[in-house]
Amino acid sequence: MPLLFQLQFTSLTFFWLLACLALGMGYAFLLYSSSAHLKKPLRNLLFALRTLAVTFISFLLFAPLVGNIKTTVEKPLIIIAQDNSASILVSKTKGFNERSYAEELKELRKALADDYDVRSFSFGSEVKNGLDLMFNAPLTDIASIFKLIDDQFSNRNIGALIIGSDGIYNRGPNPQYEAKNLKSPVYTIALGDTIAKRDLLISNVNYNNITYLDNQFQVEVSVEAYQAQGSSSVLTVSDKSGIVFSRPVSISSNEFRLLVPITLPANNKGIQQYTIRLSPISNELSVKNNTQTIFVEVIDGRQKVLLLANSPHPDLSALKQSIEVNKNYSTKIAFAAEVTSSDIEDAGLVILHQLPSLSNSAPELLKAMPSKPLWFVLGAQSNVNAFSSFQSILGITSSGNTQEATASFEPDFYAFTLTDASKQRIRNLAPLISPFGNYGLKGPASVMISQQVGKLVTKMPLLVFGEDAQRKVAVMAGEGIWRWRLEDFQESGNHEAVDELVGKTVQYLSTREDKRKFRVYPAKNAFDENEHVILNAELYNDAFELVNTPDVNISLRSKAGKSYPFVFSRTSNAYSLDAGILPAGEYSYTARTEYGKSRHSAAGKFVITQQQAEFKQTRANHQLLYAMAQQSGGKMIFPSQIGDLARHIKENENIKTVSYEDRKYEELINVKLLFFVIFALLSLEWFSRKRNGEV
């Protein structure tokens, strides 16, 4: 990297230099014109030294500029990127030896190292430095090498990119499009076999990760077979109890594809493991792709609704049928005289039909459910005064008479929504029997439906929602929902309007708020085996404010019994944990912390699914490799031609060494060498004068 200095002269600078030289000569003449006793050669030397010193010093006062030219020579950068995924060995050609191939890549690097700057990488699901080749990466992202180049070498002189791959990728964008952004030739080494081999595999499984207990869920299995016409196999699905599904598969062509829909029952709660397996056929390429394991979380999302009534009434059956349209709810009908404490304890929602009543104000019964969400249905049997004193949502002053009221929907109700079609149908249904009297809201509440008496729309609520002692409460001020349901079916052939109103009311009231002060949850319920496992934690104080003062410890335990202890890291006001990459399987976790005198714990489960993407496509995609090479001005070669690759690169005239010039201007006074020159001139002059008695 040579450095060049160049003084910037202009005509004005030249004249100033002459003036400075004249000043130096005049100063020297005045100093030495009277020194006749000195020998003439010495006097001339001292004259010259003083002239030069004064000239330099005076010239520096005009701040002349000096140019600094720095030249940098950069060799072309050659990047060798090798696919390290498992498909390289699955789709390899006969006679391919991975060890010999790895040695040939190292020899290629040595052959290029003298003339080029060579960097080598291996890639699979991520890019790694070096050529430590194991051919076991679970995924292939060819485009990741182009992203690496863009991030780390965007301003470098990239001569060429060499990619060794089979062209099979199962993550990231299409590498052919990413290669268009690289303004350098791409040389590809085509690995693998493009000829389809005899193989049977499960190419894909579509399913939902979550289902509900006692429901059925769908699984779609895609089966593929190559060069196996006339063979037969058996597709089975197994859980911990054994085989739950079986179907024979007859392969009718050499390019065989079949989509098998499977319906499975969700009989057990928790994370359930299902193994989908194809029995192997003779002489197939790989049996690893014949099996796939999926995990489905079965949630017991059903909630129990207790329909507690004063006496038998057709509303009870109508409400039960509308509620149980949603399979996540089960309804039990009981009467006030026979209900048990366990019925109340198990219920997630209690519907009080005409309770408290004129014959049974049920004070002990109402005290037994201090925190249960309640839905009051009022009617002719209701004790309105006892009802008004028990809750803080709606107050009614009534003489015991009733009136007929139809539904009028309020436009500013936002707790949940009904379809416009359902609202219109409910408006036209028969009137309900409502208590007659004065109505008044006792606190914050939302009226969904008001009473319409005849053609008069009143301010009296027919269906109102609110909160009482931190629990949700609804009041339906009218009986006769059974008439609504019958008339809805008569008019439209279904019960959808009434079922939607009842179902969404129950769903809104029964939704539970999470009041836990310590919560731990994974970022998702199912991780891939090459994916970092992320868990989050939240700790709340008594005011339900997030705090992260104490440490949070967690232990992950695999189904095999191996334990992985961790400590959460703190975020701004919560906790986070990156547990890294763990083996595939089902995991449970237990987290603990202490805040003040309180101890908290949380537990849960997640699964890590095994990746088999590298075994789902066994035919190499050389067309992709050829297209990348052609569009960039490179060349596709085969492993047997690696020895010629260095020659191809050296013959490419576009791969050249680049030199850069960095020009910088600064004042001449900043050049340190000039100081030593002036100092030497003055020192030599002073020493000569001293020796000859002039000082």
Image: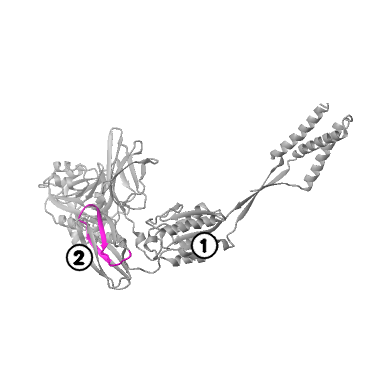
- Kindly identify the amino acid type of the residue bearing the numbered disc 1: Leu
In the figure, 640 relative to 118: above or below? below
The residue depicted at 24 percent of the width and 41 percent of the height is 469
Mark number displayed over residue 490: 2
Residue 302 inside the magenta-drawn segment: no
Say if residue 684 shows up in the picture.
yes
Horizontally, residue 344 falls left or right of residue 261, namely left
Query: Residue beneath label 1, please?
Result: 645
Say if residue 141 shows up in the picture.
no
Give the quadrant of residue 256. Answer: bottom left
Residue 199, image x and y in percent? 32, 67
Q: CA distance from mark 2 to mark 1?
A: 82 Å
User: Is tag 2's residue or tag 1's residue first in the polypeptide sequence?
Assistant: 2
Circle 2: element type: helix
Residue 445, image x and y in percent? 28, 46
Residue 247, image x and y in percent? 23, 66
Mark number displayed over residue 334: none
The residue depicted at 53 percent of the width and 62 percent of the height is 185
The residue depicted at 30 percent of the width and 70 percent of the height is 228
Q: Looking at the picture, tell me which residue is in the foreground, 578 or 399.
A: 578
Residue 342, image x and y in percent? 14, 45
Magenta stretch?
260-285
Q: Which colour scheme appears in the figure?
A: one colour
Horizontally, residue 1 falls left or right of residue 621, namely right
Horizontally, residue 15 falls left or right of residue 460, namely right
Q: Quadrant of the C terminus?
A: top right
Q: Looking at the picture, tell me which residue is in the foreground, 12 or 456.
A: 12
Which-is-in-front pick, marks 2 and 1? 1
- Kindly identify the amino acid type of the residue bearing the numbered disc 2: Gln
Q: Looking at the picture, tell me which residue is in the foreground, 299 or 276.
A: 276
Label 1: few (<14), some or many (≥20) within 10 Å? many
Circle 1: element type: helix
